[in-house]
C-alpha cells in the first residue's frame, strides 16, 4: 500500500525552454532540405519532452520501503527523518552535506528530506532527497 507518492516533474518553464531545440535543429538541417529540417526539429523536440517526462524521479513511501528514484530503503532501516525548506534546505544540500550521503537533488525543487540509514553494513549515513512536500514524506515515514 502506498502511503505517499510524488513525481518530481520539471517546472513548465523548463518544458518551454526545450522549444529552443526547434530553431537549433532547423539551423542545421534547413540548408540540406526544408522537409527534413522540419521533421527532424519536430522529432527532436518530441524526444526531449519524452526524456524530461521519463527521467522525472518518483519519491514513494510504502508500508515496506522508501523509494527515491531507482533506489529503495527498507522501512526497518529508516532512522531519524527530518524535513527542510528554504535556507535550511540549501544548507543541507551545501555546507552540511556529508560526502558519504546518498542524494537525489533536483534544482527546481526547493525542499529536501533527510532520512537516516540504520544499517551498520552500509557506509551511507543518510539519504538527502529533494521533495516538494517534505513534511508529508516525514509524516508517511513516521506512520
Image (cartoon, rainbow, N blue to C red):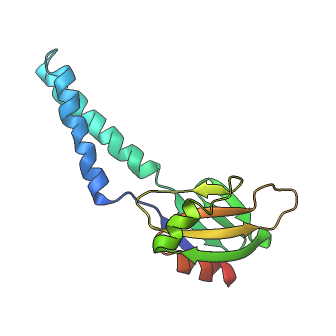
Residue 1 visible here: no
In front: 109, or 34? 109
Percent x, y for residue 99?
A: 68, 52
From the viewer's perspective, tell me whether residue 114 is left or right of residue 131: right
Task: Give the tally of numbered discs.
Answer: 0
Residue pushed farthest front? Answer: 95
Q: Quadrant of residue 20?
A: top left
Residue pushed farthest right? Answer: 120
Q: Looking at the picture, does residue 84 appear above or below residue 59? A: below
From the viewer's perspective, tell me whether residue 93 is left or right of residue 21: right
From the viewer's perspective, tell me whether residue 128 is left or right of residue 116: left
In front: 42, or 121? 121
Residue at the (45%, 73%) spot, across then down = 86
Q: Looking at the picture, does residue 143 appear above or below residue 82? A: below
Q: Looking at the picture, does residue 140 appear above or below residue 132? A: below
In front: 52, or 115? 115
Residue 66 visible here: yes
Q: Looking at the picture, does residue 128 appear above or below residue 49? A: below
Residue pushed farthest top? Answer: 32
Residue at the (75%, 61%) spot, across then down = 125
Residue at the (30%, 41%) spot, across then down = 46
Residue at the (53%, 61%) spot, across then down = 58
Percent x, y for residue 81?
A: 67, 76
Question: In which quadrant is the C terminus drawn?
Answer: bottom right
Percent x, y for residue 121?
A: 87, 56
From the viewer's perspective, tell me whether residue 5 is left or right of residue 31: right
Percent x, y for residue 103?
A: 61, 56
Q: Quadrant of residue 33?
A: top left
Question: In which quadrant is the N terminus drawn?
Answer: bottom right
Amino acid at each position: 500500500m502506498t502511503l505517499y507518492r510524488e513525481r518530481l516533474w520539471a517546472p513548465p518553464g523548463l518544458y518551454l525552454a526545450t522549444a529552443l531545440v526547434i530553431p537549433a535543429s532547423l539551423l542545421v538541417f534547413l540548408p540540406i532540405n526544408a522537409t527534413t529540417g522540419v521533421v527532424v526539429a519536430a522529432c527532436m523536440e518530441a524526444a526531449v519532452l519524452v526524456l524530461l517526462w521519463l527521467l522525472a524521479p518518483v519519491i514513494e513511501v510504502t508500508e515496506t520501503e522508501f523509494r527515491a528514484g531507482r533506489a529503495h530503503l527498507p522501512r526497518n532501516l529508516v532512522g531519524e527523518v527530518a524535513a527542510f525548506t528554504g535556507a535550511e534546505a540549501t544548507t543541507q544540500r551545501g555546507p552540511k552535506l556529508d560526502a558519504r550521503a546518498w542524494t537525489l537533488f533536483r534544482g527546481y525543487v526547493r525542499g529536501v528530506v533527510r532520512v537516516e540509514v540504520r544499517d551498520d553494513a552500509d557506509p551511507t549515513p543518510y539519504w538527502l532527497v529533494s521533495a516538494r512536500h517534505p513534511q508529508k514524506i516525514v509524516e508517511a515515514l513516521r506512520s
